[in-house]
Amino acid sequence: MAEQGQILCVVGPTACGKTRLGAELARCFGGEVVGADSMQIYRGMAIGTAAPTAEEMLGVPHHMIGVADPREAYSVGRYVAEASACVDDILARGKLPVVVGGTGLYLDALVAGRSFAAGGADTAVRRALTERRAAEGIEALYAELGRIDPPTAARLHLKDEKRILRALEIYYETGRTMTEHDAWTKTQPPRYRAVYIGLAFEDRADMRALIDRRVDAMMEAGLLDEVRALVESGVPKDATALQAIGYKELLSALAGERTVAEAAEEIKLRSRQYAKRQLTWLRRNQAIHWILWKKERDFPRALQISTEILRAAGLG
């Protein structure tokens, strides 16, 4: 796949300031923001996902925010298709796409231009596999995957039913195993040339403290009411959207399984753990230019450093 233009990616763990820096850079460089957050794509979840407010957008167009119904099971394949359409349109209008988010899989897949077998809960192949799981058990399907695609089966646990079904689905839809599909995609040049700017704290204790303060602010802003409204609107409690950090914990509070205060503490813990996983994923990318915060986030300094990076890359 041919390269189709240069983009900017502003990345980092939760609460590090990606939203603000991304909007400021887009405003300075004549760009538009494309979200890369697997939960901000859902509507009605602005508080818990820290989706940018109108004020935080600084008048800059934002795409891929609140574009899906929370009843839907959104996929990375769908994200790549829809986000790349946004990026291509922004490039075609001579503007700079600024991809902002912390979902590493979404970011990597978008930049690479990875293709995915269509799949979906309503396809004939998925329905047939689901019916077979009910009739034969996941053990039989796992054994079948072991015969078809031994490498993929070897790295999946028997309890990972979702990925077992997905691997079989890819094979029956495309005639290629997941191993073959992944190997092929790795040989393809990236769809976009990306300049990466990463935000993180020099001392992770400061990051953890900021995350805790952010959760407190979300609770004060009405996160519990947001979760309640989603349930009352008919969103199933097992929907993918309600498995997001903040929502799952408060669902149990609404069910009387724990207090709201206990749920809030669990949200803080899960958010800190998630930030650590995000950093682990992102640090594998050697192309990221990291800006490390001291005790507090210094956005004027970050904007100056980012501007120098972009100009060196020919974007300024």
Image (cartoon, rainbow, N blue to C red):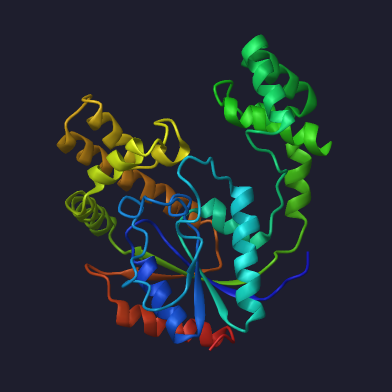
Give the left or right position of residue 171, taking residue 166 as reference. right
Q: Residue at x 22, y 36 (%)?
A: 263
Residue 20: image quadrant is: bottom left
State whether residue 1 is above or below residue 131.
below
The x, y position of residue 178, in whole percent, is 73, 38
Q: Residue at x 66, y 10 (%)?
A: 135
State whether residue 51 is above or below residue 196.
above
The x, y position of residue 15, in whole percent, is 32, 59
Q: Residue at x 63, y 56 (%)?
A: 80
Q: Residue furthest front?
A: 233
State whether residue 191 is above or below residue 264.
below
The x, y position of residue 244, in whole percent, is 39, 42
Q: Residue furthest right?
A: 175
The x, y position of residue 267, in whole percent, is 27, 42
| Residue 53 visible at all | yes
| Residue 168 visible at all | no
State whether residue 17 is above or below residue 225.
below
- Quarter holding the N terminus is bottom right
Give the left or right position of residue 238, taking residue 189 as reference. left
Q: Residue at x 78, y 22 (%)?
A: 147
Figure label count: 0
Give the left or right position of residue 140, taking residue 41 as reference. right
